[in-house]
Image: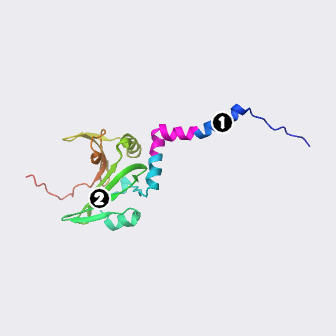
Amino acid sequence: MTQTKAIKLPRTYKLLLALAVVIGPFSWLMFTQDGQRRSDLFVLTLLGRPSFDVAYQRLNPAVSATQLRDQFPKVDFDCQDHPPRQVCRATIGSFNGFPAYAAQLEWQGQRLQLVQLIYRQRYRDAIEVQLRQDLGPADEYSTASNPVLLWVLDHGLLLLPAEKVSQRHDAALIWRAPPLPNAQSTDD
């Protein structure tokens, strides 16, 4: 039988290794945007804020309020009728892995018209990067107040402010249904 000699590490090396194991993840959580995002998501989950993970490509005017409640049972939607619209709002903690404040959806009749996801402003650039990776390049349009990035989807449009906005409620990713093909303009 052969004896194996135990490797003896210097005490300083052990101390440095232990510090790296403790400080490494902590510094990643505190000093990187991805670490901060994951920390925020963890805290929001602890606070009981539900996630609202939306597949943008699957949004379409045929999505009903009942389907929405079935798909997201943990999200507490407060729906109110404002004829001819029905508006559903919910406080959320995140959407698609990004910390958020709220979601608002609007139907006109049985037709989903609008999904508005109010996100935390510091994650706007990361949201844009993810959208460009998932949906491709965006078109940029100027509006009366701010330029917006626009993605044309099969069943609607996805809009994101082209830059950080000053008001919290303006920091919103918006899906908008296309107009009905036979809808006539009232501007005649």
**Magenta-highlighted residues:** 23-37
Q: Is residue 1 above or below residue 112?
A: above
Picture quadrant where residue 142 is located: top left
Q: Quadrant of the N terminus?
A: top right
Viewer-proximal residue, 186 or 18?
18
The answer for how far apart the CA atoms under marks 2 and 1 are is 51 Å
Amino acid tagged 1 = Leu
Residue drawn at 27 percent across, 40 percent down: 166
Across and down, in percent, residue 83 comes to: 18, 65
Across and down, in percent, residue 137 comes to: 35, 41
Across and down, in percent, residue 120 comes to: 36, 46
Res. 66 in view: yes
In primary-sequence order, the first of circles 2 and 1 is 1
Question: Please, what secondary structure does the residue beneath circle 1 have?
Answer: helix
Question: Please, what secondary structure does the residue beneath circle 2 have?
Answer: strand
| Residue located beneath label 2 in the image | 105
Question: Badge 2 local density, few (<14 within 10 Å), some, or many (20+)?
Answer: many
| Residue located beneath label 1 in the image | 17
Amino acid tagged 2 = Leu
Viewer-proximal residue, 180 or 144?
144
